Image (tube, rainbow, N blue to C red):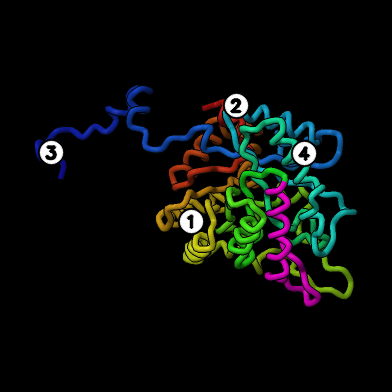
Amino acid sequence: MTDAAKLDLPIRPRRVRRTPALRAAVRETQLSAGHLVQPLFVHGDDADTPLDALPGQTRWSLGGLVAQSGRCLGAGVDKVVVFPKIPEAEKTRRGEAAHDPAGLVPRAVAALKAAHPALCVITDVALDPYSSDGHDGVVDAGGEVDNDATVAVLVKQAVAHADAGADVVSPSDMMDGRVAAIRAGLDAAGHDRVAILAYSVKYASAFYGPFREALDSAPRAAPAGRIIPGDKATYQMDPANVREAQREAALDEAEGADLLMVKPAGPYLDVIRAVRERTRLPVAAYQVSGEYLMLEAAAATGHLDRRKAHLEALVGIRRAGADAILTYAATEAAGWL
């Protein structure tokens, strides 16, 4: 029982909510531009192409990517993660273009670091943008995603990105053992200072649709005579599981990850909290395309205040325990803050 209750005094928690200054003084969760990471899409075309699937987002040319990253920096967002749209003709079953040193991502990284040395450039390490099967890994003759064959390719991909100047490589494939292999590969190539942001907890979610449309990276229908998984549930996590998330995070931490990721964010706030309580590593969360699009769609119809809804969602992700948030609203949110 509180002292006020003992004295039969009225309890008035509202007193510290009365003014903006008082609310700011007792605010428990802080959100700043430094917590935000801006995902950016790039393609090899000369034109910048607005994305119908993600209002307000663009598939950038290399020049457009550099210019947009400068705008991010100007808003206080000093971290970007790059996702490539690869031409269909360059996609193969083993995704060889993923580790081409002259490929789209290495060229994009080099251009970004040359133009904006202070920018933290994060790259996505996975095969789905490069795979003719649309999977994050190599699909074998039996129709299974081959874990170990995939890991060997991911190591080459991570090293190619580091060679180009990436500050952080971010394996999003959910193959077993890939963090340890990538760490060993980076160190052997002289990149011991390049960090690994591991997608430790990536669910087989329905919220990725607009992203896959932006990259044309959805699983493909099986060609005649082959059977391949129609979704990614054989390697991404079951949305029903949280203990498994803790196990995956612990494994990646033991293998040498520098940061741990939970994806998606909004429907999995309990998972972010569970991971946060089990590790001392920084925890990131990805507010994915479907989450962003729901807010945008509701705001477009006038049912939500766009600014307030985005900021409330981001504060919720921070409150759950995320140290960094990947969000398509990053640059705008930084301006609002």
Residue displayed at 78% across by 35% down = 50
Q: CA distance from mark 4 to mark 3?
A: 60 Å
Instruction: Tell me if residue 288 comes above or below residue 11 in the rendering.
Output: below
- Disc 2 to disc 4, C-alpha distance: 20 Å
Q: Is residue 161 magenta?
A: yes
Residue 59 numbered tag: 4
Q: Label 1 vs label 3: CA separation?
A: 37 Å
Q: Are the residues flagged by discs 1 and 4 in contact, CB closer than 8 Å? A: no
Report the disc number at residue 3.
3
Residue 209 colored in magenta in the image: no
Contact check, label 2 and label 1, Cβ < 8 Å = no
Crowding at mark 3 (Cα within 10 Å: few <14, some 14-19, many 20+) = few
Q: Residue at x 18, y 33 (%)?
A: 10
**Looking at this view, is 218 or 93 the one in front?**
93
Residue 81 appears at what percent x and percent y?
65, 43
Kindly report the secondary structure that dominates the magenta region of the rendered protein: helix
